Image (cartoon, grey):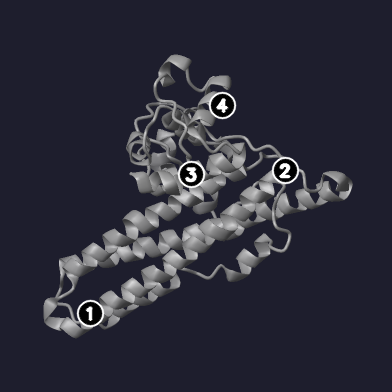
Amino acid sequence: MSGLVGDNYIILLVMSRFGISLGFGDRTVEEVCRRSGVDTFTFLAIVNTMLDEEYAPAPGEGEISVECFLRYLHNSHDYYLEFRLPEIRRKLIEAIDCRHGDIAFAVLRFYDEYVAEVRKHLEYEETTVFPYVRALLAGTADQSYDIRTFRRQHDQIEARLTELKNILVQYYPSEGSFCLSGVLFDIFSCEADLAKHNYVENHLFVPVVEQLERERAESRAENPQHAAEPLREVLSQREKEIIVCVVKGMTNKQIAEQLFISTHTVITHRRNIASKLQIHSPAGLTIYAIVHKLVDIDEVKGSIRGEDIAPDTAEKRE
């Protein structure tokens, strides 16, 4: 893994979005992925797609984990909305020359409108596309929607950022500002990163979901009496970690700090866990965790509570 990162530093971003930590020594890619609960083939497929636009998984080469892919995309959204875009805005404010008040205000408003567009785009994926794909995995998807709808609506979210970059380069009246040059570099970098993100979705994620749709359609055709029967989903490693934290009585904020993820990500995981297991209380999760040997009974004595674990409710209590 260290050699892979050394040759292609962009892989650091991919690793962070999979929740893979640094400090892996001389372990192989497979060993690092396994320790982080990440499907190795899915990780390598995304890395190869970002590095080579001609790449496509060969038939029989391996199978992409849709759930692992969804986790990667969700963490990518958190990265853009909670870190990258706010950081660029902060640097943009520092770089804008106060002597050009009206122009500076217009530039900042332009950027904020762009961020609002990105947020709307990513929220559509979070609230419509991802739940549809998970329902598809469970065999309960609404057949009035398909991934082609997403493909048609998948506009290029980096386009407006390109326009802002060009405006600053060609027309903004700066005087050799190092700060402005620095934020322009960040905008160029973010523009390229968002383009790669879109490419991965269009050329890897969408085909994977289309294949899943075909498989589910064939299954319904072959077994019409089981067409509405949900398929059992397997918990991801991260979801198992969330369960362990919940049954130990930790709040969403504490779980986020423990696992180095955002509170929003914790809430999303808890919704997915409740949907997969149809278990909606810490007491129920405790039983599940003990039966499946995720925790020892001594670890959770005294922390079993009978409260509703609906993430929104839990978050309000915090």
What residue does disc 2 label?
Answer: 230
Crowd band around label 2 with a 10 angstrom C-alpha radius: few (<14), some (14–19), many (20+)? some
Task: Look at mark 1 in the image and give the residue it sits on.
Answer: 105
Mark-to-mark CA distance, 2 and 4:
20 Å
Residue 54: tell me if it is visible: no
210 vs 270, left or right, is right
Q: Is residue 216 visible?
A: yes
Q: Disc 3 on helix, strand or loop?
A: loop
Q: CA distance from mark 1 to mark 4?
A: 55 Å
* Nearest to viewer (mark 2 / mark 3): 3
Residue 186, how many percent across, how many down?
30, 62
Q: Residue at x 42, y 37 (%)?
A: 20
Taking 1 as reference, is 169 left or right?
Answer: left
Q: Are marks 3 and 4 in contact (CB under 8 Å)?
A: no
Q: Nearer the viewer, mark 3 or mark 4?
A: 3
Q: Kindly identify the amino acid type of the residue bearing the numbered disc 2.
A: Pro
| Element under disc 1 | helix
Please identify, in this view, whether the residue under mark 2 or under mark 1 is nearer the observer: 2
Which residue is tagged 4?
Answer: 288
Quarter holding the C terminus is top left
Residue denoted by label 3: 310
Quadrant that contains the N terminus: top left
